[in-house]
Image: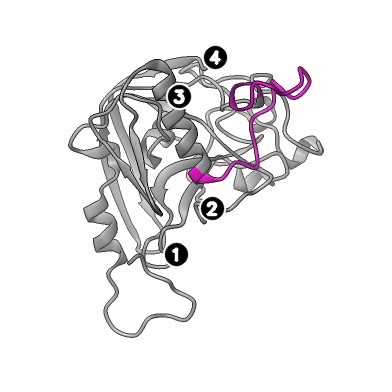
Amino acid sequence: MQQFVEIPAGAVHLNDARRGESRTVQLRSFQIGVVPVTVGTYAPAASSAEAPLPATGVRWIDAVRWCISAAEAEGIPPAYAVQGDEVLWDLAADGCRLPTEAEWVRACRAGSSGARYGELPDIAWTAADAVEGPQPVGLKQPNTFGVYDMLGNAWEWCWDRLDPARYGDYRLLKGGGWADPEWSCRAGVRRGDSPTARLEDVGFRVVRGAAGPEGQGWSETVDRARAAITGPRPVGWTPLR
């Protein structure tokens, strides 16, 4: 069963390195999983040895569908609806969902202002540990909000698009994984991939709480504006349609 911790309302600062912009987002309170969704929670038939590991190799779209199923199992309205290739988010729904980037950063930093909420060897499984795969969740130290494994062990899907002008509908990944070097396991690092990509070092963590009209730092309208390109399209860019 997924356990949650309350993250208090507050502000979070986000940077967009490609556009050279920064913004401060005011968040309402929300709940986040104390640990990433584990194999035992994602696939209850898993062996006892696999159960405490973070569920990895999970596609973004599969994480969305898991959130829908979890809400339906609780008898509450799901946050998402899948219509063909499109996922719609009901900002007023309270069901399990993926965190926005702003929520993820707020939960990760836990009031700290540096790249990490503690000394890396103490809080995260990284390349320095020389492990060959994901490790059981909750073995390293939590941050001051009581959340474990925000950095290292497995990358985590967020709701947000990585860069809708350059990568279309690619979704954001945060946190770093067990094989990543120190520089990659920082609160501000961003990575992304296709919603249908299955990556061995990628899992997910869920949040609960209605996003309200402000969307907890995300807006479809803003994404569409960010995707707008004037003049010739740079080689390799595939803007959101």
Q: Secondary structure at mark 3?
A: helix
Crowding near the residue tagged with mark 1, few <14, some 14–19, many ≥20 C-alpha atoms within 10 Å: some
Per the image, the residue denoted by label 3 is: 70
- Mark pair 3, 4: CA separation: 10 Å
- Does the magenta-highlighted stretch encompass residue 42? yes
- Mark pair 2, 3: CA separation: 20 Å
Residue at 73% of width from left, 28% of height from top? 135
- Mark pair 1, 2: CA separation: 14 Å
Per the image, the residue denoted by label 1 is: 167
Which numbered disc, 1 or 2, marks the residue closer to the eye?
Answer: 2
Prevailing secondary structure of the magenta residues: loop
Q: Secondary structure at mark 4?
A: loop
- Mark pair 4, 1: CA separation: 35 Å
Residue nearest the observer in this picture, 22 or 197: 197
Q: Residue 121 appears in which quarter of the rendering?
A: top right
Label drawn at residue 196: 2
Which numbered disc, 4 or 1, marks the residue closer to the eye?
Answer: 4
